[in-house]
Image: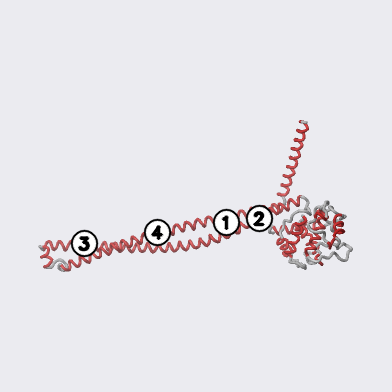
Amino acid sequence: MRRLAGGAVALALVVAAILGTAAHAQTDFVESDPEVIRAREQVAAAQLAAHQAAAELEATAQQRDATQVSILEHVARIEELGHQRETLAAYRNALRAVMRDRAVALYRNGGDGTGIAAIEESGSALEAARRQQLGSAAAESNQRTARQLEEARAQLAGVQAALRDAEEELRRRRAELDELVAQQAERQAVVDERVAAANVALERARAVGALRAAGDPVMGPSTLTAEQMAGWVRSQGFSPRIEADLTELAQIFIDEGDDEGVRGDFAFAQSVIETGGFESAPANNYSGIGWCDTCPVGNRFPDPREGVRAQIQLLVNYADAGSTAAGLTHPVSPYLYGSDPVAAARKFDNFFAKGWASTWREMGNGNWATDPDYSGKVIGIYRKMVAYAQGG
């Protein structure tokens, strides 16, 4: 028993190794898909732009902050110089007051200090001369100091004016930097959105690559949006003649496909081939149902959704060998299988070609169409829509 168990473990390890190798091979195949490579390059380019935008935004924000610091320093320096100028002006005014008082005293004592009153007051001519000399020297010193103070005050005023001009220039620069920061922030938001979009596109490309590696199965999820599908049709210059808005019709394909597990975007690509870009879709028949090589008319459907639903259900029958009417999300289309529900379900369940084309590569050569190049045409349209969705 131990040997059997050991053998079972060894076999399990071998199987796991094979599956792991297969998974790696599948991943490598997907990653080497041209659309995946292109999408990765777009992600890398978008990320590079985002990094550059972030660096520029950070640098500008630092410049703005440094400018604001300089503005505050200039304001503080201007205020300091203003206080110094006020102090000097007060000192100058005090000196002028002293000089005025001294001039008054000299005038009262004889004008220039040599009169009789000055001599009598001083007690002698020598003392009067000495007082006159000291008074004149003090007056000259005061006048010289006052002039120096006035010059210093004027210089301070000039420096203060220069600082104000510099402050104004800094404020102007700050305003410019504020605007630049706002612009760069907007750019950052845009490139961030581009990175997000590029990542979404990469995931879509990988999903498409995986499906392509699996042979482009009919069953599976849609990878394109209605806007992308309709946008591609419009970009080709087609003039759709349909009862619904083209984007709304594309959304119906996605919704009906999701309901039954069919790739609705691929079914839309099929309809582009069948209708010539929806320029010829009589009676809401988007897939040539009933239009065989010798049939004069095809099936008619009362509205767009019924036409798409019949197409999706027929694709289920071609793709899934185990499909049943009971397993459908919606009742079998009465416009395709008949108005009697029981008979319609029986026809669906006993479809002669059930499971004959599980992939789009198997379509054509009698499966849906007799054209041997039918699958290549549909797949080609689908890939063009994917390329359009990827941005080119």
Task: Classify 10 Å Cα crowding around label 4: few (below 14), some (14-19), many (20 and above).
Answer: few
Q: Secondary structure at mark 2?
A: helix
- Give the mark, 2 or 3, whose residue is nearer the N terminus: 3
Of marks 2 and 1, the one in the foreground: 2
Of marks 2 and 3, the one in the foreground: 2
| Amino acid on which the number 3 mark rests in the picture | Ala
- Give the mark, 4 or 3, whose residue is nearer the N terminus: 4
| Amino acid on which the number 2 mark rests in the picture | Ala
- Give the mark, 1 or 3, whose residue is nearer the N terminus: 1
The residue at the far right in this view is 294
Residue 76: which numbered mark, if any? Answer: 4
Task: Measure how far apart labels 4 and 3 are at the Cα level.
Answer: 37 Å
Of marks 4 and 3, the one in the foreground: 4
| Residue 98 image position (x, y, % from top left) | 23, 64
Q: Is residue 163 above or below residue 37?
A: below
Q: Is residue 231 above or below residue 219?
A: below
Q: Quadrant of the N terminus?
A: top right
Residue 374 in sight here: no
Task: Measure how far apart labels 2 and 4 are at the Cα level.
Answer: 50 Å
Image quarter of residue 155: bottom left
Which residue is labeled 1 in the image? 53
Which residue is labeled 3 in the image? 138
Q: Are marks 2 and 3 in contact (CB under 8 Å)?
A: no
Task: Measure how far apart labels 2 and 3 are at the Cα level.
Answer: 86 Å
Task: Classify 10 Å Cα crowding around label 1: few (below 14), some (14-19), many (20 and above).
Answer: many
- Give the mark, 2 or 1, whose residue is nearer the N terminus: 1
The residue located at (17%, 68%) in the rendering is: 107
